[in-house]
Image (cartoon, helix red, strand yellow):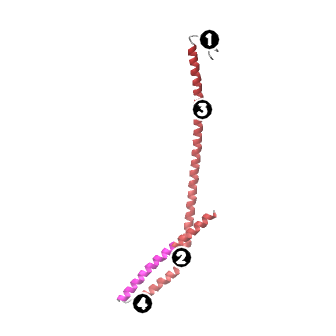
Amino acid sequence: MDITRGDYARFNDRTYLEVYDTIVAQSEKKYEVEAEAHLSTKEELETERSKSKKLEDKLEELEKKENVKEQKKKERIDKISKRRGRILSIIMLGIPYIVFIAFCEIAKGYFSSLTMRSIIVVAGIIILTAIAGKIYYKLQSKIIKMIYDYLGKKYYLEE
């Protein structure tokens, strides 16, 4: 209809070629429009991907900063708790430990002769001092851990 404009007299031997060319031209125009839309969608997708990549990079950077900050907090709490724990354990346990060791050394001095009884007593005293040392360091580490837990809770609750 577009080629002959409704007039059958306009039909000729080339009419079918003109109709075909018109159909092909319309199809190519639809294809071009669709291709342009596809290209614009593709460009938008690339833009969104680059934005997403930037946001992911920024998120990763913030997570790294947060991890570094968290690690510094833990190191600081650890350092403070060790210092305070050692001081507290020296005050609470160190003085009795030193008195106990001094008592053991004095007791060893009373058993200077080589009798079976003195050998057993001296060996017992040596074992007791070794056990006392182990107990001291175990209690000291428990005190440090308690202080670490306390400071950790306090430090994280303040923020």
Q: Which residue is mark 4?
A: 110
Amino acid carrying mark 3 in the image: Ala
Element under disc 3: helix
Instruction: Measure the C-alpha gap from mark 2 to mark 3.
Output: 76 Å
Q: Which residue is mark 1?
A: 8
Bin the neighbour count of mark 1 within 10 Å (Cα to Cα): few under 14, some 14-19, many 20 and up: few
Q: Indicate which disc, 2 or 1, sits on the residue closer to the N terminus.
A: 1
Instruction: Measure the C-alpha gap from mark 2 to mark 1.
Output: 114 Å
> Decide: marks 4, 1 in contact (CB < 8 A)?
no
Viewer-side label of 3, 1: 1
Q: Which mark is residue 152?
A: none
Bin the neighbour count of mark 4 within 10 Å (Cα to Cα): few under 14, some 14-19, many 20 and up: few
Q: Which residues are magenta?
A: 116-141
Q: Quadrant of the C terminus?
A: bottom right
Element under disc 4: helix
Examine the rendering and report whether any part of residue 103 can be seen.
yes
Amino acid carrying mark 4 in the image: Tyr
Q: Which residue is mark 3?
A: 37
Q: Quadrant of the N terminus?
A: top right
Examine the rendering and report whether any part of residue 114 can be seen.
no
Amino acid carrying mark 1 in the image: Tyr
Rendering coords of residue 8 (x, y %): 62, 11
- Seen in the picture, residue 108 relative to 33 is either above or below; the reply is below
Bin the neighbour count of mark 3 within 10 Å (Cα to Cα): few under 14, some 14-19, many 20 and up: few
Rendering coords of residue 62 (x, y %): 59, 53
Q: Indicate which disc, 2 or 4, sits on the residue closer to the N terminus.
A: 2
Q: Indicate which disc, 4 or 1, sits on the residue closer to the N terminus.
A: 1
Q: Which residue is mark 2?
A: 89
Q: Indicate which disc, 3 or 1, sits on the residue closer to the N terminus.
A: 1
Instruction: Measure the C-alpha gap from mark 2 to mark 4.
Output: 31 Å
- Seen in the picture, residue 112 relative to 135 is either above or below; the reply is below
Element under disc 1: helix
